[in-house]
Amino acid sequence: MPGTPRDRGASAVGGDSIIRPPADRASMIPDQPRIFDYCLAFSRNIGWVTDAEQQALRTKRVAIAGLGGVGGAQALTLARLGVAAFNLADFDQFDLANLNRQAGATICTLGRPKLDVVMEMVREINPEVDIRAFPDGVAERNLREFLAGVDVYVDGLDFFAFAARRATFAACARLGVPAVTAAPLGMGVALLNFLPGRMTFEEYFRLEGQPESEQALRFLVGLSPAMLQRAYLADRSRVDFVAQRGPSTAMACQLCAGVAATEALKILLGRGEVLAAPWGMQFDAYRNRMVRTWRPGGNASLLQRVTLAIARRQLVRMASREGV
């Protein structure tokens, strides 16, 4: 089974694990086994969670699809929280354009599968972690397996992965799995939660039957009705919905990881306020602003329809200037 301690050369000793470094790192680390103790490793969480809650987190399973800038950081943050079981999906490899923001991207990992790299990083935090790997990503054919036994789904898919995202959130709704999406926008984060029995992803965003450029617009405006990030976009030519290209920062990805992991913690432990769509939140570190948003009807609401119309006109003007 992928994710067992034996995958990394660890063996159980008295309930603990002996960890031996990979051969290529052995020269940098003293030649002696290190004993892993879950309670000690995550003891600094205690105070913000109770001992009993920490042990509860040890029994939880989190699914994350997409292990790039947002998903990779989310996986590492949840592993450090003490979550000890994951379903992880990604089919991509690291390249140079990932170095500015993705947790697993380094010169040494270029060309390597993101899934393999992030699994290694998670196991170096907790060698006892159980990981079910999905190297082909997520699609209709494997979503039931991907979400089997999962306590919460945390979205890490690329902004433009609309088919995979719609299918995944629809499966969460069918199977009763809470779903968290935290999007990196500018130098901030926008949050939406889709909880069992509440408004669904499709009911909120209304993407069905729309061309991909319109889906991108609806997804963006639906995530951030306040559009806090719009005021300081320095080079508008770098936003191209048709070419499926847009800028992203490391700060936004890290904020996403913190916010999504906090929402996951509240869902997993059953305490704290969890906003459910059509309620949302956006925090922008650059502008030092945080707003709570409410769009009953999602993108079908009058206010959202007006916002979408304005955004479409702005995109047309931008495209016109680029074409001149």
Image: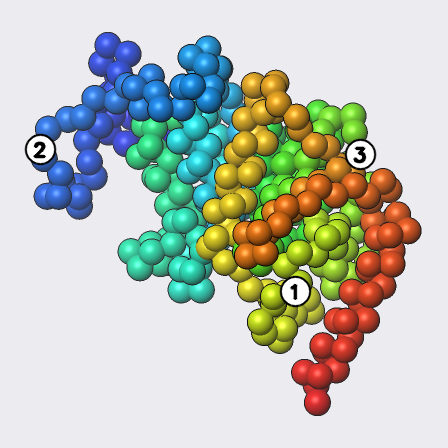
What residue type is disc 2 on?
Asp
Tell me the distance, in whole angstroms, between the alpha carbons under discs 3 and 1.
30 Å
Q: Residue at x 33, y 56 (%)?
A: 106
10 relative to 64 in the view: left or right: left
Identify whether 61 is placed above or below 16.
below
In the image, residue 292 lies at what x, y percent? 71, 41
The mark closer to the camera, 1 or 2, is: 1
Q: Earlier in the sequence, mark 3 or mark 1?
A: 3
Q: Which mark is residue 199?
A: 3
Pointer 1 or 2: first along the chain: 2
Characterize the local packing of mark 1: few (<14), some (14-19) or many (20 or more) Cα atoms within 10 angstroms. few
Asked if residue 211 lies left or right of residue 242, the reply is right
Residue corresponding to mark 1: 231
**Image quarter in which the C terminus is found:** bottom right
- Disc 2: CA contacts within 10 A as few (<14), some (14-19) or many (>=20): few
- Label 3 crowd (10 A; few <14 / some 14-19 / many >=20): some
Give the label on residue 31, or none.
Answer: 2
- 219 relative position to 265: left or right: right
Q: Amino acid at mark 3?
A: Met
Residue 131 in view: no
